[in-house]
């Protein structure tokens, strides 16, 4: 076997393994096994002793509905974000609107016409370290991480999408541009501005 063929085989196995890992993570975290981990908050107020506040926000873009099939839920209100903290799960409904962004140069992964989703949830939970799973079940994409929350603090967890690459001509030293039109391949999580 040639080196190129071995490299392709290794990449294919890695991609299949990632998909299987995401599917298993989604299945394991889509239902609650606890209900006492966090309390959803509507407003502000002081943080009680022993607790911390965590606000989770995410903004992402998908293609418009019906582009690939009539059963496709991208661009509809059925497209949801799954959040699971220490076994307590909730599906977040996003606010959505049509958006057109004109390309200004290379590296604009959200340029074009599509649907912008904004997800947000504010909650109170005990101070300490918590396991967080974020997923988009419709795209079979999931990530997990740990957040450490200090007593009495208000924290922000930003979940940024990582989009797939567009097919491009292969040239040495050049990489294909990423685009929301090709779907989401993962997420980056930042707690108070620091990657986790």
Image (spheres, rainbow, N blue to C red):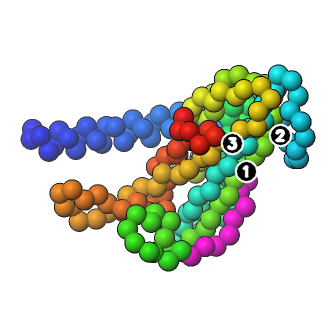
Task: Using the rendered view, name the quadrant where residue 12 is placed.
Answer: top left
**Which residue is pictured at 31% across the width and 37% down the height?**
13
Q: What stretch is highlighted in magenta?
A: 93-100
Q: What residue sits 54% from the left and 34% below the top?
A: 196
Q: Which disc number belongs to residue 40?
A: 2
Label pair 2/3, CB-CB below 8 angstroms: no
Q: Earlier in the sequence, mark 2 or mark 3?
A: 2
Is residue 114 shown in magenta?
no
Relative to 81, is 99 above or below?
below
Residue at screen point 31% across, 60% down = 176
Specify which label sits upstream in the sequence, 1 or 2: 2
Left or right of 14 on screen, residue 140: right
Q: Which quarter of the rendered picture does the N terminus lie within?
A: top left
Distance between mark 2 and mark 3 Cα atoms: 14 Å
Furthest toward the left, the residue is: 2
Mark linked to residue 180: none
Spatial CA distance of label 1 from label 2 is 11 Å
Query: Where does residue 128 sit, x and y in percent of width and height?
Result: 71, 22
Under tag 3, what secondary structure?
strand
From this view, report whether residue 92 is shown above or below residue 181. Answer: above
Front-most of residues 42 and 85: 42
> What residue would you read off at disc 3?
156
Q: Are marks 1 and 2 in contact (CB under 8 Å)?
A: no
- Crowd rating for badge 2 (residues with CA inside 10 Å; few <14, some 14–19, many 20+): few
Task: Name the residue carrying label 1.
Answer: 120
């Amino acid at each position: 076997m040639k080196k190129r063929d071995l490299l392709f085989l290794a990449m294919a196995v890695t991609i299949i393994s990632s998909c299987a890992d995401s599917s298993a993570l989604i299945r394991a975290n889509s239902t609650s096994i606890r209900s006492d981990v966090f309390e959803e908050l509507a407003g502000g107020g002081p943080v009680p002793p022993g607790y911390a506040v965590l606000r989770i926000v995410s903004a992402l873009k998908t293609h418009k509905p019906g582009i690939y099939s009539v059963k496709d839920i991208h661009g509809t209100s059925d497209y949801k974000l799954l959040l699971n903290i220490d076994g307590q799960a909730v599906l977040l409904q996003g606010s959505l609107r049509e958006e057109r962004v004109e390309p200004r140069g290379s590296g604009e992964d959200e340029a074009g016409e599509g649907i912008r989703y904004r997800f947000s949830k504010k909650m109170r939970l005990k101070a300490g370290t918590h396991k967080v799973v974020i997923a988009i079940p419709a795209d079979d994409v999931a990530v997990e991480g740990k957040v450490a929350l200090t007593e009495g603090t208000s924290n922000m967890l930003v979940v940024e999408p990582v989009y797939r690459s567009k097919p491009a001509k292969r040239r040495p030293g050049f990489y294909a541009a990423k685009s929301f039109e090709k779907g989401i391949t993962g997420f980056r999580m930042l707690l108070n501005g620091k990657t986790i």
